Image (cartoon, grey):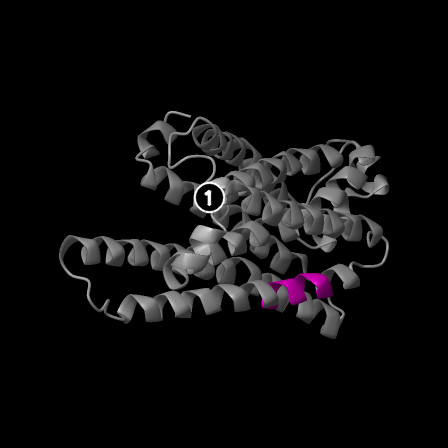
């Protein structure tokens, strides 16, 4: 998310009385972050707990999903920090720092999940070679380092109208979507190809695995397009026109918040735990 969506959380704004009239857009922004915290935190915490306890396929095979859930937990907490920063300006720096994780963390781990499914379907031999947990740890460590760099970039561009951050977000969007679309097309081609010499139950199971991988990559890619394309268009519009229309950023924020529930719902559906989610 761009820092321009948080301009009303400056020290001057926080020093005003609490009964000051807040604009409708600001109220929507606070509601979106509050919703993200109240519903996102328990949902992603539940998914993290399920993976950690081995309810699904095990920590090793779901390591990317585990890291994505941890990232979303931090993002959910940032929603609370944002709301509090309206009254406590000292939290603004922390809130701005965590925006970098919001921008980079989720797409990075979603991209790793797509690449993993791509390797499992298109290059199964290489997938088995890189299946041990240590390779997943290396990839996730790299993703966290990049996310940390994005956090530092977000904090350092607080006073520069976030132009650097906007360009970084746009380039990242193009890269992530390109990788996901490549994986999607490759898995679709593998799904359409018939398996020579394979028949019966083995072929049915292989096609089922390919279809699951294709559906996951398809949903993740569509989710990424819905989440990040509006951000990119709004960012480019802000740069080219010089007009910072906050209502556009709030629309992007709402899409981002809702999109954060796609992956956990898919996981809970896969593990047949959706009924437990309603009890949270």
Question: Neighbour class for label 1 at 10 Å: few (<14), some, many (≥20)?
Answer: some
Give the image location of residue 37, x and y in percent.
57, 34
Magenta stretch containing residue 169, yes or no?
yes
Residue 64 visible (yes or no) = yes
Give the image location of residue 248, x and y in percent.
61, 60
Is disc 1 placed on a helix, strand or loop?
A: loop
Q: Who's the residue at 31% across and 58% down the image?
A: 210
Give the image location of residue 57, x and y in percent.
38, 37
Vertical relation: 136 (above or below) 215 = above
For the residue pair 214 and 120, the one nearer the viewer reads as: 120
Q: Who's the residue at 46% across and 58% down the image?
A: 126
Q: Main secondary structure of the magenta part?
A: helix
Q: Who's the residue at 52% across and 41% down the image?
A: 133
Dividing the image into 4 quarters, which one contains the C terminus?
top left
For the residue pair 133 and 251, the one nearer the viewer reads as: 133
Describe residue 101's horizontal placement relative to residue 251 as left or right: right
**Quarter of the image where one finds residue 78:** top right
Dot 1 corresponds to which residue? 261
Q: Which residues are magenta?
A: 167-174
């Amino acid at each position: 998310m761009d820092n321009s969506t948080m301009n009303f959380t400056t020290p001057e704004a926080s020093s005003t009385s609490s009964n000051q009239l807040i604009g409708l857009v600001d109220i929507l922004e606070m509601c979106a972050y509050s919703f993200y915290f109240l519903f996102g935190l328990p949902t992603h915490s539940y998914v993290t707990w399920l993976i950690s306890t081995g309810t699904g396929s095990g920590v090793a095979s779901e390591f990317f999903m585990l890291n994505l859930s941890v990232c979303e937990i931090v993002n959910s907490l940032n929603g609370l920090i944002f709301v509090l920063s309206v009254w406590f300006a000292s939290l603004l720096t922390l809130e701005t720092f965590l925006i970098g994780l919001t921008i980079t963390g989720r797409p990075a781990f979603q991209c790793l999940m797509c690449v993993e499914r791509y390797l499992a379907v298109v290059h199964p031999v290489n997938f088995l070679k890189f299946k041990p947990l240590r390779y997943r740890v290396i990839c996730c460590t790299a993703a966290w380092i990049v996310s940390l760099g994005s956090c530092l970039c977000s904090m350092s561009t607080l006073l520069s109208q976030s132009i650097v951050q906007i360009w970084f977000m746009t380039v990242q969007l193009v890269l992530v979507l390109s990788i996901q679309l490549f994986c999607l097309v490759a898995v679709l081609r593998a799904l359409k190809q018939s398996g020579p010499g394979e028949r019966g139950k083995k072929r049915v199971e292989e096609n089922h695995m390919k279809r699951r991988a294709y559906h996951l990559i398809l949903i993740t890619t569509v989710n990424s397009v819905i989440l990040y394309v509006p951000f990119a268009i709004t960012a480019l519009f802000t740069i080219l026109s010089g007009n910072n229309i906050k209502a556009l950023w709030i629309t992007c924020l709402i899409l981002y918040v809702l999109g954060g529930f796609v992956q956990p719902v898919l996981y809970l559906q896969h593990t047949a735990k959706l009924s437990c989610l309603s009890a949270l």
